[in-house]
Image (cartoon, coloured by chain):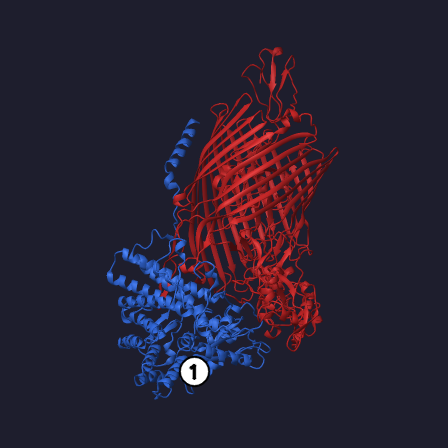
Chain colours: A red, B blue
Amino acid sequence: MLKGTQQGTTSDTQGEFSIAIPDGAGSTLVFSFVGFLTQEIAVGSRTTLQVALQTDNKALEEVVVVGYGSQLKREVTGAVQTVKGTEFKDIPVSQITQKLQGRLAGVQINQATGKPGQGMSVRIRGQVSVSAGSDPLYVIDGFPITGNIDAVNPDEIEDISILKDAASTSLYGSRAANGVVLITTKMPQPGKTTVGFSAYAGIQKVPRKGRLEMMNAEEFAQFKKESYEDAGDEVPEEFINPSKYRDKDNDWYDALLRTAPIQSYTLSVTSHKENMSSSVVAGIFNQKGVVINNDYKRYSLRVNNRFNVSKKVEIGFNIAPQYVYDNTPRTDGDRGTGILFNALHTWPVMPIRDDSGELTLYNTFPGSTGNIFNYPNWVRASNELINETKNISLLSNAYVQYNPLPGLSLRSSINVEYLTAKFFFFNPSTATSAINVPVPTTAVSIRQSLENIGWLNENLATYAKSFGDHNFELLAGFTQQRFRQEFARIQGDTYADDRLPTIQGALNLSRGGTNNGIQEWSLASYISRLTYNYKGKYLLTAAVRADGSSRFGVNNLWGTFPSASVGWVVSDELFMSNIEKVSFAKLRASYGVIGNNNIGNYTPYALVNNTVNAAFGDQIATGAAVTSLANTNLGWETTRQFDVGLDLGLFNDRIQFIYDFYTKRTTNLLYNVQLAQESGFGTFADNIGEIKFWGHEFSITSKNLTGAVKWNTNFNISFNRNKVMALADGIDRVYGTFHITQVGKPFGQFYGMVKEGFYMTQKEVDDSPGVAGRSVVGGIKYKDVNGDKDITNGGDQDDRTIIGNPFPDFTYGITNSVKYRNWDFEIIGSGSQGNELWMRHLYSTANLDGVFNMVRKANDRLRAQKTEDSWEVFHAGNGIFGQTAGRDGTLTGLERDWPSSHFVFDASFFTIKNITLGYTIPTQNRFFQSARIYGSVQQVYVFTKYWGGNNPETSGNGAGNGDGGNLSQGIDFSNYPVPRSFILGVNLNF
Amino acid sequence: MKKNLLLTGILGLLITGCRDGFLTVVPETQLSSATFFKTESDFQQAVNGAYVPLRTIFNDRAWKLGEMHSDNTYYARNILFGAVDNTENIADFALPVSKGVTTNDNVLQQFRQDYQIIARTNEILSRIDDVEFDAGRKANLKGQALFLRAFAYFELVRYFGKAPLHLTPATNRDEATAPLSDTEALYSQIETDIKEAIALLPVKSEQGEGRATSGAANMILANLYMVKKNWAGAESVLKTIVNSGEYSLMPDYDDAFSETAGNKNNAESLFEVQYLEGAAGLNGNFFYQFVPTPILAEELAPLTGTSNPQGLSGENNNVPTPDMIAAYEAGDKRKDISIGYVTLSQSLRVNNKIYPYIKKYARKHSLHNNTGQNWPVYRYAEVLLFLAEALNEQGKGGEALPLLNQIRSRAGLADVTITAQAELREIIFKERRVELAFENKRWFDLVRTGQAREVITAYGNRIKANPQAYYFPPASNPPSNAFTVLDDYYPLPAVEADLTPHF
């Protein structure tokens, strides 16, 4: 730019420029570039100039993406944490959320199952709700999407902002209560065209250490033998000589596992031209699972384009199509679906392969050996069942931005999300995932197709203006969003030929399994925000959103969600100027009201089910019945949150420290209040109750060494607590699977009997409280909690109480990175303390009846010998498992069937999530500009005392399709193990 | 460029303009109460829906609460199975009772299913008069609804002796519970409803197959009078049924019971719970709950005749007791029709692996675990036996004999000639046990005649003295608290007690 004129030019991609200067020597050229200090150079007589601009430290101060805009980090008044895409690029996993484990304060990210592409649970600030969802809202490039981000290619991501407090999230109104995750995809940066290629490949396997240790064939036979001997019964012939199984062990669990490859390739191109800039990222990700026949593939593309139509008008188009293929054996869940769980408790004396090397169809032992189940071959189940999903999705934005006046910007956008998902399940006649289903079984096919279409229109105006040291920015807008899902499901069974699982090939179409449906919602909103600061030192933000939602009852259609926050940059004050060690200090406080509208789409309506059919003679008569009660007052859940924080930079920001304290109250929880069923209805959807949450978050970033060796450490730790203050009138508790949520207590606690040990003598049985007819010598002894001398499970004389907590006392993460010359090294750890797991699989894997294989720890169980009229303990054992001498399910079943502290174990852990070592090849050559190779190990090691399985982060449900939900967290069904991966990777820039 | 902006603006306005409608999204694939109960067809469907809980009750609960809770049937203990207390406790008269309520799940489910019928019929009865359609068809639908409501309350009063009385549908949380009504109040409501139903309902020959008829409604009224010992009232109502000419005994006892796909609602049948074999989800599987286990596929196949028999493990229920087997007189044809035997190679019993099972429900069918035979609720044979009993109780033993002997002669037994009231009472009572075996009558009969405590105590002593005769494997026994809870009525369910302030 020629000073004092409108004349100017821009440099080309090589940084070269030319400009004609009319009056030569007296002219001054002004060089400017985003992020650099403007420089003026008098031309003089020179005809070539070489200019190197100085970076502008002030301007380069980190910009943070916040809701509906961005802010300088130093001026942010809410609790926001940002992670750059480059920070997690080397971590060889498919999901972004996996890559974030250990990095975020106040955000608990757990991997409930090791299935590729699935199972991550994200809870911001310990948010829970009784029955509304607790997942945060995910916003991709300004578009609040309806699902999660599991399938988004992490290489497309520029940065991620986590909005934690109400002031940061309130512009998302009725969807903000669980926190908001803002994802910004890669936009072209000023500069020349770049081409990058990165790839990695490696293997995954499940380490031996950490697996649940089960008895081998010989140990199992020995166990069976002892259980007959202790009972004084004749030992069945099969178990008289356990050593005959010494070389005939069948490790059913191991037979399902394999070493599996993982690979990822990403090609990215960015170009920046005068009027158009573009960024393209194409990815292929291919992960075979460590369970046989598990296959996950993702092909993704993202094209982000920006056009500067004129100086005042900018248009952008982003489009991101994607295809995901996933075939997952039915690994997770209880006996009906979980082949891993089933494999664990299958008798190891049963052969996986027959004498000719063929996989057996199924195995049974004679009833005289105590076998009552038919064990299908789980390897067949894994190989032969088809359970595949094919998703095609598209995420797209288009916007026009018009800047008619300096400081004023008008922006209008249309966003579309589309998903079509095809699911196919086929259970051939030769295999089944459920125990005790005879093989050959009835072949079943399920086809499901689902189509989601959502759109969002946003119209926003932003005006920024400064009056002296007073800086204002005002945002106002109107948005509307609509979403529609259509699905159809067809289930057929009984096939003549397993090779043709077509719909027309099914002899039966299942009435109950064949259905279709539509889910739809709409949301209209007004938003506004005022940001003000004085000299960048005193900061104020006020925001409000009004949401009208089709999900709310007609008497409660609109909700308003206001917030305000203030900040004070203390270090800018004069009195701080002589405290040199403190380079930056900011105090923040915020308060706001936010909502959770995950209450179901049609909850306010009373629904009539018209498939309540009856038979009369040989005729079917269609029937109908009202199945729910209407609630026209139904609304969103409300959370009021207060946050105070301190941001501190020491020693010229070498050490940065962030602290937040929050407290929030969630009221109007959506809950299907249980009704007395004499009304004919089970529940009534209502807004009830109150939960109080509070917590502390610390994070510290330290540049330990800054010389030739650069060493940085990040550490964060979070403490989340909650207490249920109220539920509905007359209801002080809500039960989960093995859980209770009770007024005055923390949410979702483990609930059951307290195990005191075992009855050691008949006198102890006679003198102590017990279960009539079931408490025996050597059997489990429960605590008489209510002191009525009787042990009762449930009812009015209940002895159940809170016996554990699936939620941690605190979670923490630590990242160390070291750079030396061309080498870089990083190690990431993530931990959780005080969380417990309910080792649900013990009801089978330590069933004292001897009908299943047993955990190895049961070798050292309590043993008692049957006497004439009682039992006599002769080996106390490790205190975990009782005697088998009763040999009657009524007696031994007490330990197995009654939920108790017998199943609850500490699952605190510290996991070294990732170690990466990289080397940047120093030479530039004509093939590429820079190149780096690295090796990375994922899920390196888990430090834990938990012995129930490989993954102390696990949480599951019996159906194997979820993490149990809010009310029932922390149940270990022996889900898919989390593998350890070793990979080699390369990053090239051309 | 300006065009684009203009376009955006217009688009924005268009969408903004229709905002009220924009926020109204009604369920498209489900009906809601706002759109239902408008036409005759809606009420027809609602009445059909009100029959549905009967399928669950008779498939899963009624035989536990009415038959296994007596000396007719028992479970056959499989010691490898725990978690069977809910059913064993009923057969063992060892229900956990605390403050008048029980945690037993069978009791809970029976209670809930009856109230499903009541809620559905209340919904119909509260709305049907507001919709205009053919008076005759409306009367029929109302009659069926009243019949079903009376049926459900009659079950409740006989099981529990007291129950909350709901006669209108609940519309909010406050209306969900009602105070307990006592036996007399419930009897009175049942009588009112069933008398109205009798007036509204057509006779069997004019009614759709399998639906409630005036004859079935009369039988409920008669049964109520029998329970109340209103013998004269019972006699009069029962004679109405006999004189209607709508019913007769099937010549062969075996034919009194439906096949899986035939002989349903036959001439002897007053009311059956309707099942339909196949994939429509309207089938039963109660025989599979009765069949002795562990049974191999090849042992089961001859009993069911299916193309895909599969072995069953678990603990079997509703096994005829030695007492029941001994109750048949020599030469009674009904014995071999009602009871069969099967040998279980996998049984844990050592000396005797032969188990009796209820043969009259073992009808051949196509697919494993999917049966279509109906459950006989009221048969003409019981009309005759009730009438004989009502007459004898009024000292008219001579009139009672021909009725009783109709039943006996079909069974191949000699006529009874005794007319002494006390002796005849005993004979009729025994006849009921064998004629109506496994039809969930025994417990109600014991209670109705005031013999429950005495009969069950003796029966319990026999089991405790010789558990192996009652299907226990060696060294296994009934629980120590067996046969200690001998009340005439079941305690109300604890889960429901937690949800109501009234009990």
Q: Is residue A192 visible?
A: no
Identify which residue is drawn at 67% across, 55% down: A210
Left or right placement of residue B139 versus residue A692 in this view: left
Pinpoint residue A57: horizontal percent, then vertical percent.
Answer: 64, 26
Secondary element under disc 1, as helix, strand or loop, is helix
The answer to which of A370 and A619 lies nearer the viewer is A370
The answer to which of A129 and B308 lies nearer the viewer is A129
Quadrant position of residue B62: bottom left
For disc 1, the marked residue is B335
Q: Measured along the vertical axis of the image, is residue B40 above or below residue B370?
A: above
Q: Is residue A595 visible?
A: yes
Quadrant position of residue A558: top left
Q: Quadrant of the C terminus of chain B?
A: bottom left
Q: Quadrant of the N terminus of chain B?
A: top left
Pinpoint residue B156: horizontal percent, then vertical percent.
Answer: 40, 67
* Residue type indicated by callout 1: Lys
Identify which residue is drawn at 60% across, 77% down: B475
Left or right placement of residue A275 versus residue B39 in this view: right
Quadrant position of residue A271: top right
How many numbered tags mark residues here?
A: 1
Left or right placement of residue B233 versus residue A221 in this view: left
Specify the farthest residue to the right: A708
Pinpoint residue A5: horizontal percent, then vertical percent.
Answer: 55, 15
The answer to which of A645 and A480 lies nearer the viewer is A645
Specify the farthest residue to the front: A788
Q: Residues within 10 Å of mark 1 (few under 14, many from 20)?
A: many
Pinpoint residue A737: horizontal percent, then vertical percent.
Answer: 54, 57
Q: Measured along the vertical axis of the image, is residue A914 above or below residue B476?
A: above
Q: Measured along the vertical axis of the image, is residue A676 above or below residue A57?
A: below
The chain to which mark 1 is attached is B
